[in-house]
Structures are given as structure tokens and as C-alpha cells.
Image (cartoon, rainbow, N blue to C red):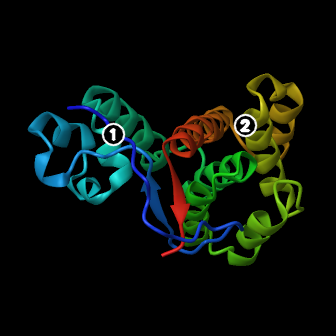
Amino acid sequence: MTESVLTPPPHTVPVVFTREMLDWLPWLAPVPEEELTQRQRDGLKDPSRAKSPYFRLLARDPDVLAARTRTDKDIFYNTDGGLPRAERELAAAAASRVNGCIYCASVHARFAVTYSKREADVDRLLAEGVGTALDPRWDALVAAAAALTVTPIAFGPAHVAKLREVGLDDYAIVDLINSAAFFNWANRLMLSLGEPASP
């Protein structure tokens, strides 16, 4: 199966961060849903992802997709202890805001609001960026996620100390690192394979 370059249909590319649902248009042809092999479907891990052009594009390498999906689900859905789900989503939204990934920021900002009910704070993060003041705990989380995103070595003992000051234990700090690091990588992948579109 060969990849072919696509010219997306006419669309409007969003230029501001938002919590609105956005589309994502690939620059390479995803596997057509009806042509997914069983191995590719197994790599998706979730049958509903077969509707997504992004995941069907990643299905061209089903083993990597399967590993990516297991990692994603463990970081964000395994909330047995550690950082609450809302704050994992906040870290992903912050990383996406730093990287300029409007699509990923919209998804994770919506989840952060769903789990935290802090709509105004999440909207401020999107509108004003990672330097905006929210509250001491969220400020520490966002600062740590942003530092990891800019360059991992920028995250250091001062961030860890601040995170401990606002109540994070070792497990919560690892969850924050995993959430930001995963989306630092995921943003770059998504930004290199296609672009967001306003529906």
C-alpha cells in the first residue's frame, strides 16, 4: 500500500485556540475504512477510531499505532492514584498550546473542562497562553508542562519543588510528565501530517 499526497478540500484553518470541535485534514492518504485489515483494526484498539482519518493514517504502521494507543490510554485513562484526569488533560492542553497545535489543544481543553468544571480558567489558558495566572496548583502544573514542551532539560528541580509545594506526590509528578511528554510528541506528529479545519 503506497501513501499518496493529498490536497485537502477547500476549508478554513482556525487561527485561534478554541474548545470548539474541529476537523483534521490529512496531507497523506489514510487507509480507507473499508480497506483496514484485521491487524490494522487491532492496532486501533478502539473500533470507533476507524472513523478518524488521523488514526487510519497511523494504521499504516499498526504495531506502532497499537503501542501509541496503549500508551495514550494508560496515561489518560488509568487514573488509579496519581494526578486527577482533569490535570492530565490540562498538561496536554498546555503542551499543545506551546506547540501551536490548535486541534490537540481543543480536544484536551474540552476534556480539562469536562473533568474540572473550570471553563473560564481553561479558556484563559487557550486565549492568553501558558503564562497566564490561574491558581497556584494549576500555575505549577502548566509551568512544568510548558518547560517539558519547550525542551525537556528545561524541566528541573525547581519545577519538582513547586509541584510538591502544591500537593503533588511522586505518582502525580510522573503522570504530569507523561501527559506533557506524550502530547509534546503527539502534537509534532499531528502537525507534520495534516492541519485542523473549522467544521
Residue at 12% x, 46% y is 35
Q: What amino acid is at disc 2?
A: Thr
Residue neighbourhood size for the residue with mark 1, other residues' Cα within 10 Å, grouped as few (<14), some (14–19), many (≥20): few
Q: Quadrant of residue 49?
A: bottom left
Question: For mark 2, what is the residue?
Answer: 149
In the visual, does 139 lie left or right of 25? right
Q: Quadrant of residue 65?
A: top left
Q: Quadrant of residue 179?
A: top right
Viewer-proximal residue among 87 and 2: 2
Counting from the top left corner in percent of width and height, residue 96 is at 66, 50
Viewer-proximal residue among 77 and 31: 31
In space, the residues marked 1 and 2 are separated at their CA atoms by 31 Å
In the visual, does 142 lie left or right of 53? right
Q: Is residue 83 above or below residue 23?
A: above
Question: For mark 1, what is the residue?
Answer: 4
- Mark closer to the chain start, 1 or 2: 1
Counting from the top left corner in percent of width and height, residue 39 is at 14, 34
Q: Is residue 128 above or below residue 26?
A: below
In the visual, does 80 lie left or right of 37? right
Counting from the top left corner in percent of width and height, residue 184 is at 63, 38
Residue at 46% x, 59% y is 24
Q: What amino acid is at disc 1?
A: Ser
Q: Give SS at disc 1.
A: loop
Q: How many marks?
A: 2
In the visual, does 37 lie left or right of 100? left
Q: Is residue 147 above or below residue 54?
A: above
Which mark is drawn over residue 167?
none
Q: Give SS at disc 2.
A: helix
Residue at 74% x, 26% y is 152
Quarter containing the N terminus = top left
